[in-house]
């Protein structure tokens, strides 16, 4: 067969083989080049072929020594090629596979010609299919090879959408659009991913659909950022999905570690980037309670000695400022004592006859001590230790 037919059939063979293993081919230009080279390489035994004209230093000696369609059209030569190019496997496994698959496609295609090929060279047996010569193709014929080329090109064009979607199994999962299938795609992705979903709100049963950033996932369960909130999408989540599909991007997933070694809560908040998501556990050096008790967040779990975050955002983290346990009551008691001292001072000022100045100075000193104690309590901060993971989005990349 001629070079265009071998190239088309080689690309089809490599693309379909890669698709079975969910390997990218259409965007891997080095692999495409290796597939083309491999599909032409067996014809290096003929100076009249495309690759033979490009490599006369190899094609002329080979033809003189062995002739056309002999050793280079055999499994023995393919085995030798796999050994010689073995270092390529360590650096570009896709290119290595594409080269050998392209080479194999050439041998298969030539088996369908009138003359066949000696696959088991040096054994003289010629391998052909189909068995009857009338059904095999004559190299260069317009009706025979022209028809084969047209069919192969059509199949290649028809197969490109499948290759673009990531292969046969990925395409099948895309058509299924189930949470389990989407989770399989998510696990294979190594970049930032989005979830395209259709479903209904769990409590209201109202329809909902959209596209949301995937923060994390487990089988049939997704944590997503949708409509300004972190939500769950799954069988028991806030969103009950009908159809879900994973969409990959070119942006890498970036996670930043944040270690606390005795910092205050406010210092933690200041170190959190905007538009990020925080996960992890931090423990306090003393029991505490939060100042804003009415605000609720499903992303933050609070105990008397720790905070646990699950994709919490900076704004909601900043609302749960801690204070030492019992500090509010102590401040209230000190404030009442302070007011009592003020009342004593006013009463002494109005006393007749006037109170001795030493008595007034003693009470004023007591007031100053209470005020210092109040200020010291207000400045006292709970300190934390622990490790947090900060998921950065595309805005921080």
Image (cartoon, rainbow, N blue to C red):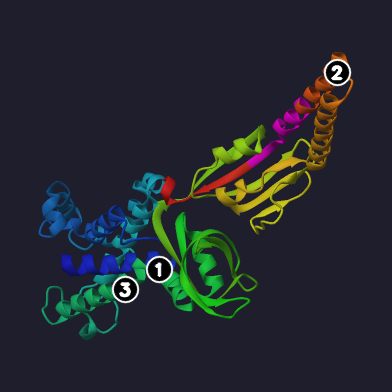
Q: Which residues are magenta?
A: 372-387
Task: Give left or right: position of 89 versus 320.
Answer: left
Name the residue tied to disc 1.
Answer: 167
Which disc is residue 159 wearing?
Answer: 3
Q: Say whether disc 3 or disc 1 marks the residue closer to the N-terminus.
A: 3
Neighbours of disc 1 within 10 Å: few (<14), some (14-19), many (20+): many
Task: Give left or right: position of 331 versus 160.
Answer: right
Neighbours of disc 2 within 10 Å: few (<14), some (14-19), many (20+): few
Is 172 in front, or is 183?
183
Rendered location of residue 323, percent (x, y): 73, 40
Rendered location of residue 115, percent (x, y): 21, 73
Name the residue tied to disc 2.
Answer: 362
Task: Determine the CA span between mark 3 and mark 1.
Answer: 9 Å
Task: Determine the CA span between mark 2 and mark 3.
Answer: 94 Å
- In the image, what residue occupies the spot 64% across and 40% down? 387
Task: Determine the CA span between mark 1 and mark 2.
Answer: 87 Å
Q: Nearer the viewer, mark 1 or mark 2?
A: 2
Seen in the picture, residue 50 relative to 203 is either above or below; the reply is: above
């Amino acid at each position: 067969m001629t070079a265009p037919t071998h190239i088309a059939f080689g690309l089809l063979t490599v693309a379909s083989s890669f698709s079975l293993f969910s390997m990218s081919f259409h965007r891997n230009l080095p692999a495409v080049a290796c597939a083309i080279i491999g599909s032409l390489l067996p014809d290096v035994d003929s100076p009249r072929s495309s690759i033979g004209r490009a490599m006369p230093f190899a094609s002329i000696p080979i033809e003189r020594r062995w002739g056309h369609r002999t050793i280079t059209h055999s499994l023995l030569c393919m085995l030798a090629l796999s050994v010689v190019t073995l270092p390529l496997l360590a650096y570009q496994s896709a290119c290595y596979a594409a080269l050998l698959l392209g080479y194999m496609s050439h041998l298969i295609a030539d088996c369908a010609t009138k003359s066949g090929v000696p696959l088991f060279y040096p054994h003289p047996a010629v391998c052909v299919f189909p068995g009857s010569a009338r059904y095999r193709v004559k190299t260069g014929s317009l009706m025979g090879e022209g028809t084969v080329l047209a069919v192969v090109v059509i199949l290649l064009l028809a197969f490109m959408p499948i290759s673009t979607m990531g292969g046969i199994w990925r395409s099948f999962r895309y058509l299924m659009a189930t949470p389990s299938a989407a989770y399989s795609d998510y696990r294979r992705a190594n970049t930032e991913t989005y979830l395209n979903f259709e479903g209904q709100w769990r409590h209201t049963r109202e329809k909902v659909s959209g596209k949301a950033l995937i923060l994390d996932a487990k089988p049939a369960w997704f944590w997503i950022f949708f409509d300004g909130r972190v939500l769950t999408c799954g069988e028991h989540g806030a969103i009950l999905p009908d159809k879900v599909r994973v969409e990959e991007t070119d942006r890498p997933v970036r996670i930043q570690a944040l270690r606390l070694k005795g910092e205050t809560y406010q210092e933690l908040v200041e170190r959190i980037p905007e538009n990020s998501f925080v996960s992890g556990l931090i423990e306090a050096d003393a029991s505490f309670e939060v100042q804003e008790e009415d605000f609720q967040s499903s992303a933050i779990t609070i105990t008397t000695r720790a905070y646990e975050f699950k994709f919490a955002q900076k704004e909601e983290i900043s609302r749960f400022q801690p204070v030492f346990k019992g500090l509010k009551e102590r401040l209230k008691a000190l404030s009442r004592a302070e007011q009592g001292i003020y009342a004593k001072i006013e009463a002494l000022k109005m006393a007749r006859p006037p109170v001795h100045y030493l008595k007034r100075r003693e009470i004023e000193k007591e007031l100053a001590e209470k005020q210092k104690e109040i200020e010291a309590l207000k400045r006292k901060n709970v300190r934390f230790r622990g490790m947090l993971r900060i998921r950065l989005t595309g805005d921080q990349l």
